[in-house]
Amino acid sequence: MLYQRSSALFKEAQNVIPGGVNSPVRAFKAVGGTPIFAKSAQGAYIYDEDGNRFIDYINSWGPMLLGHAFPPVVDAVIKKTKLGTSFGMPTALETEIAELAVAMVPNIDKIRFVNSGTEACMSAIRLARGYTKKDKIIKFAGCYHGHSDSFLIAAGSGAVTFGTPNSPGVTQGTAKDTLLAKYNDIENVKALIKANKNEIAAIIIEPVAGNMGCIPPTEGFLEGLRTICDSNDILLIFDEVMTGFRLANGGVQELKGINADIVCFGKVVGGGLPVGAFAARNDIMNLLAPLGPVYQAGTLSGNPLAMSAGLAMLKAIDQDKGLMNRLEEKTKYLHNGITEALNKNNIPHTINRIGSMISVHFSDQAVVDFESAAKGNNDTFKKFFHGLLNKGIYIAPSAFETWFITDALTYQDLNETIAAVEEVAKSL
Ligand SMILES: *Cc1c(COP(=O)(O)O)cnc(C)c1O
């Protein structure tokens, strides 16, 4: 495959956009090579500026659960655009999508819409701090909650020490309020809470992790967090920006039958437009401005384009009773095919999968947390990535990302993908 035009566009972009991209992972730094410039997309396929076609397993990092340019979303946005794109006034549409979201997701009374997952998570911890009147939060190594200061924190030297900033620009003052725990390690969480008695406002977690590859919670882990939070006056925040409206209509709360205190959404909820949201029961949500003292706002929050896209998406999910099952079956089929192809070529690997999320790790050990995810062979991954890319299969350009399966994928697409994996595996 040729990427001449993408190369030229990347060069030009780098003059005026830092690194040529508006979000770093797009730059292919983890795998090398030139990022592909997208021109259009339809269903399961994405087309680049050189005219190449790819079967897309990124799907804009999650939103395109039903495929690119999903007609109900496109139609809704076009219709709304002609009536004005933003009013800075409330609209009936916002109530309509809020009612549907509250009906689909268990355990929430109210929801507020924002413009990104980052905003949702940032607002959720402010709300949790306002509610509990405590300052510290616990997050898990390898979980991503957007790029706000409180989350750009690395583990300190000891297991129970304060975090340290992992980006310049994040102050030590902010870092000291974020504690880092190990995913799937309840004892580690207990130790942190013990060492910071009565200081922790919230534990925030991806209840199925997707930002270190796909890592489902081990048996009893989320239940354990729920119990600890209840007995220590700590709010449990599920960051379902990736999993919400994807792993079940009601996200991981529904899938695993565990209630969070605050839930964050993004990606699918916007149907491909910039939308995030956070939600909780009344006693928590009523603390938000203008009802309560916890401030949160947004000029373009709930704008009609974003809300019409989100509403069309949620309606489609809500009305399609077979969707989640179909997605899971397709993902399972892909899983089995890839396993067979890699085994035939004696490539050590571990595949994690839940619902429509799947990740291939070039490691023969179980991948259960950030440490074990980091043990994967990155050189093998790079070859795997570029090999697949050249065969028209677009997976995430990093070993730490999940593949997102869309309902637009046909079994023929999956077979084409498996055949490509088998070819590529021969050269790994
Ligand atoms: C993508 C993501 C975010 C950040 O959302 P943005 O819309 O990129 O700001 C937060 N949390 C999780 C779990 C995510 O996957």
Image (cartoon, rainbow, N blue to C red):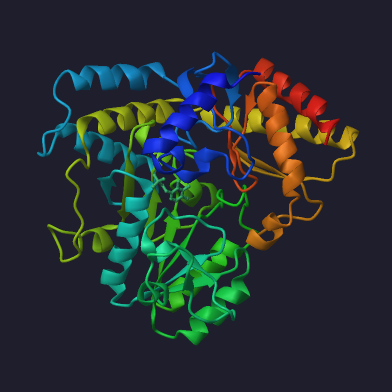
Figure check: 164 above or below 290: below
Q: Where does residue 362 sit, x and y in percent of width and height? A: 76, 46
Figure check: 420 above or below 188: above
Q: Where does residue 111 sit, x and y in percent of width and height? A: 28, 48
Q: Where does residue 18 sit, x and y in percent of width and height? A: 41, 43
Q: Where does residue 154 sit, x and y in percent of width and height? A: 52, 68
User: Measuring 39% from the left and 45% from the top, which residue is drawn there?
Assistant: 105
Q: How many numbered markers are drawn?
A: 0
Give the quadrant of the C terminus: top right
The quadrant where residue 382 appears: top right
Q: Nearer the viewer, residue 91 or 323?
A: 91
Q: Is residue 316 left or right of residue 386?
A: left
User: Measuring 38% from the left and 51% from the top, which residue is drawn there?
Assistant: 264
Q: Nearer the viewer, residue 202 or 59?
A: 59
Q: Is residue 271 left or right of residue 393?
A: left
User: Measuring 32% from the left and 77% from the top, which residue is drawn there?
Assistant: 134
The quadrant where residue 39 appears: top left
Q: Nearer the viewer, residue 210 or 208?
A: 210
Q: Is residue 44 visible?
A: no
Q: Is residue 357 visible?
A: yes
